[in-house]
Amino acid sequence: MKYRILLDLKDQLFTAVDVNDSNNFGNGTTIEKAISNLKNNNKAA
């Protein structure tokens, strides 16, 4: 899976977004947590 990482400077949250489906994303306080949440969200779909 390819993804891009965004950082919300206001809330200090990372977001990992699937490059093929922008509706599939995960948030976390670290990049690793955001990626993990993205992968877990992908399994639930």
Image (cartoon, grey):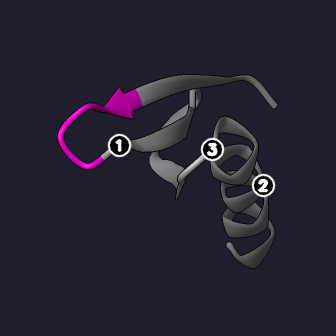
Mark 2, other Cα within 10 Å: few <14 / some 14–19 / many ≥20: some
Identify the residue at image location x=72%, y=44%: 35
Circle 2: residue type:
Ser
Circle 1: residue type:
Gln
Q: On the rendered structure, is 45 left or right of 14?
A: right
Q: Mark 1 points at which residue?
A: 12
Name the quadrant containing residue 22.
top left
Q: On the rendered structure, is 25 left or right of 23?
A: right
Q: Nearer the viewer, mark 3 or mark 2?
A: 3
The quarter in which the N terminus is drawn is: top right
Identify the residue at image location x=81%, y=69%: 43
Disc 3 from disc 2: Cα separation: 10 Å
Above or below residue 10? Residue 6 is above
Q: Mark 3 points at which residue?
A: 30
| Secondary structure character of the magenta stretch overall | loop
Circle 3: residue type:
Thr
Residue 27: % across, % down: 51, 55
- Magenta segment includes 6: no
Q: Nearer the viewer, mark 2 or mark 1?
A: 1
Identify the residue at image location x=68%, y=72%: 45
Residue 21: % across, % down: 52, 39
Disc 3 secondary structure class: loop
Residue 18: % across, % down: 60, 35
Residue 32: % across, % down: 76, 42
Disc 3 from disc 1: Cα separation: 9 Å
Q: Name the residue under label 2.
A: 36
Disc 1 secondary structure class: loop
Disc 2 secondary structure class: helix
> Which span is picked out in magenta?
7-11
Above or below residue 13? Residue 16 is above
